[in-house]
């Protein structure tokens, strides 16, 4: 029995933005032509972390990237390689040989600026020529631009850090998301009449501008809920600096501890503020809820 071939998109795909989307769509097209499995090959750790010794604040964790690829592009076969010093020092030809053989590749799709192998000596053009020698197809996707900007993870990180979620959504092609297990918090939201679900950004993931957002929360049962989401250190309740993500689901009651949820950040509403009393905070949450409903009432009907 002949092993089924794969067509893969190869890259890091942080944020899974419109530029990445061009690779993913081309991969699906090639897979359909070849009767192959459309797949994605990525790395768990950003290569720059080891290559340049600098931490790159990621838009999404590896699990977050996988979830977006599946949900937005319908590619279920997502493979992660652990990027370590061995991978970093591997000659680019050896890396290409390894993935072609181990994944039974028929086609590879990469971006124009893709580099790999020892000292980044493997380029997209070198890979394409090498694949031709191996009888493997290879497409190089040119940059995708929007408003004169090349769509890039670096630019999108700057938008998220500034809280500009509407612009980030345009460049991502989908709202910025956080997927996490709901944690038990301090139950302070319940005490002030605004029960919340508590989540956290994984280590190494970029934290958006602190403040309150119009958001949507998607639960395991597939239900969708308008929410007001606070990203920050809860200055009214806490003197610490631990960042939490608290979402008040409008018109929802139920215990979601231990369940998976996905928060979509749609619109920055206001900065995080320390209130003198619970009553002031409750009144502000009510105003935030009105603002969030108004925002979605207008945007969902466009």
Image (spheres, grey):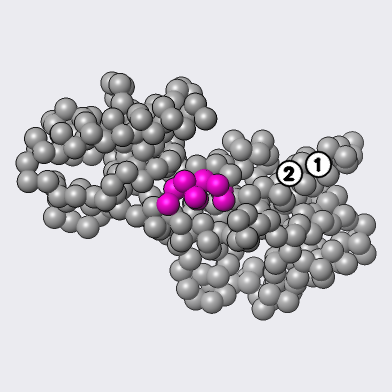
Relative placement, left or right, of 113 versus 65 is right
Q: What residue is shown at x 55% (from left), y 47% (from top)?
A: 170
Q: What residue is shown at x 32% (from left), y 40% (from top)?
A: 229
The answer to which of 122 and 234 lies nearer the viewer is 234
Mark yes or no: residue 79 visible. no
Which residue lies under the disc numbered 2? 25
Q: Position of residue 144 (x, y in %)?
A: 68, 56
Mark yes or no: residue 149 visible. yes
Which residue lies under the disc numbered 1? 29
Rendered view: 219 above or below 55: above
Secondary element at image label 2: helix
Looking at the rendering, the stretch of residues picked out in magenta corresponds to 164-172
The answer to which of 270 and 39 lies nearer the viewer is 270
Relative placement, left or right, of 3 versus 9 is right
**Extreme residue in the left direction:** 277
Quadrant of the rendered image containing residue 128:
bottom right
Q: Residues within 10 Å of mark 2 (few under 14, many from 20)?
A: some
The answer to which of 180 and 269 lies nearer the viewer is 269
Q: What residue is shown at x 83% (from left), y 37% (from top)?
A: 32
Relative placement, left or right, of 30 versus 235 is right
Rendered view: 155 above or below 272: below
Whether pointer 1 and pointer 2 mark residues with C-beta atoms closer than 8 Å, the reply is: yes
Question: Which secondary structure is most common in the magenta stretch?
Answer: helix
Q: Position of residue 89 (x, y in %)?
A: 66, 75
Q: What residue is shown at x 92% (from left), y 57% (from top)?
A: 135
The answer to which of 285 and 14 lies nearer the viewer is 285
């Amino acid at each position: 029995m002949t092993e089924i071939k794969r067509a893969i998109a190869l890259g890091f795909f942080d944020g899974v933005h419109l530029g990445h989307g061009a690779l993913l769509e081309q991969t699906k097209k090639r897979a359909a032509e070849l009767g192959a499995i459309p797949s994605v090959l990525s790395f768990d750790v950003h290569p720059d972390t080891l290559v340049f010794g600098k931490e790159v604040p990621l838009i999404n964790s590896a699990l977050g990237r996988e979830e977006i690829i599946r949900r937005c592009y319908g590619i279920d076969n997502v493979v992660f390689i652990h990027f370590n010093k061995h991978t970093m020092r591997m000659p680019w030809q050896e890396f290409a040989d390894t993935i072609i053989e181990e994944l039974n590749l028929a086609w590879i799709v990469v971006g124009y600026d893709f580099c790999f192998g020892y000292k980044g000596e493997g380029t997209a053009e070198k890979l394409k020529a090498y694949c031709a020698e191996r009888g493997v197809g290879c497409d190089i996707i040119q940059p995708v631009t929007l408003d004169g900007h090349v769509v890039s993870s670096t630019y999108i990180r700057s938008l998220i850090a500034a809280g500009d979620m509407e612009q980030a959504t345009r460049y991502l092609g989908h709202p910025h998301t956080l997927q996490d297990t709901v944690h038990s918090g301090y139950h302070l939201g319940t005490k002030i009449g605004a029960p919340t679900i508590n989540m956290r950004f994984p280590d190494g993931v970029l934290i958006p501008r602190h403040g309150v957002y119009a958001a949507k929360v998607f639960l395991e049962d597939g239900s969708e809920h308008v929410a007001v989401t606070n990203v920050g250190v809860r200055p009214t309740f806490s003197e610490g600096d631990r960042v939490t993500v608290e979402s008040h689901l409008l018109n929802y009651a139920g215990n979601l501890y231990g369940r998976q949820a996905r928060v979509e950040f749609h619109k920055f509403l206001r900065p995080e503020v320390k209130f003198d009393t619970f009553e002031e905070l409750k009144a502000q949450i009510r105003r935030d809820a009105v603002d969030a409903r108004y925002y979605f009432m207008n945007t969902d009907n466009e």
